[in-house]
Amino acid sequence: MKLSRTGTLSLFVSLSLLCSSLPVKAQMDGEVPRRSLRGIETLDVLIEQLPESAQKLGLSKDSLQTDVELKLRQNSITVTDVKDLKSQATLYVLIDVIGTAASLSVSLGQPVRLIRDQSVFALATTWEVRGIASNPSAKFIREHVADMVDQFLNAWLSVNPRTR
């Protein structure tokens, strides 16, 4: 049986997930995504509703919200309530647990204007990091979300240097 490149890659990723609890990561964190972070001083934080499977691991939306907001505040980013709509950007955290696999995502959404029609605004993801892990625990997920938020903060600090 001969596998195509896609089939080989899929098999490799599947075997990696079965043999390891380390996340497989994908990211949108280069020069252009980082430039889109310039000037952001205020963020909303939205932890998407956790599925029951994540809650069964012991994860809570409130603890994740506190973890993320604390990291942002420690780096001089003002955190507002999503309901207040005072921010121009929202940091989204999405966690899904299906069976023995977890998908983690931290992304930044911002309103953007289309070049071809300046009257059209849309919400766009301008920065993102994602990961997949097998056999995760609540502690593992919280630690990796914290790592992803740190990655966001490093990207943010690269274009918003502190002046002390």
Image (spheres, rainbow, N blue to C red):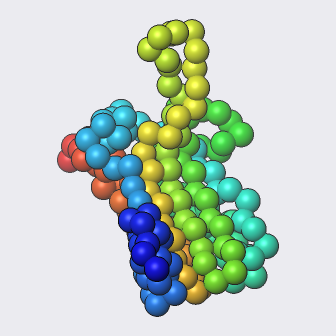
Question: Height in image: 20 above or below 120?
Answer: below
What residue do we see at 59% from left, 74% from top?
A: 102
Question: Height in image: 133 above or below 85?
Answer: below
Query: Residue most toward the left?
Result: 164
Q: Does residue 12 appear in the picture of this structure?
A: yes
Total tally of numbered discs in the picture? 0
Q: Position of residue 27 (x, y in %)?
A: 39, 55
Question: Height in image: 111 above or below 23?
Answer: above
Query: Residue most toward the bottom?
Result: 19
Q: Is residue 43 left or right of residue 151?
A: right
Q: Position of residue 83 (x, y in %)?
A: 71, 40
Q: Position of residue 12 (x, y in %)?
A: 42, 77
What residue do we see at 36% from left, 59% from top?
A: 151
Q: Position of residue 16 (x, y in %)?
A: 44, 82
What residue do we see at 54% from left, 28% from top?
A: 111
Which picture quadrant has residue 64?
Answer: bottom right
Question: Height in image: 89 above or below 151?
Answer: above
Q: Does residue 23 appear in the picture of this structure?
A: no
Q: Is residue 148 left or right of residue 51?
A: left
Query: Residue most toward the right?
Result: 52
What residue do we see at 41% from left, 60% from top?
A: 26
Closer to the camera in the image, 58 or 41: 58
Closer to the camera in the image, 87 or 12: 12
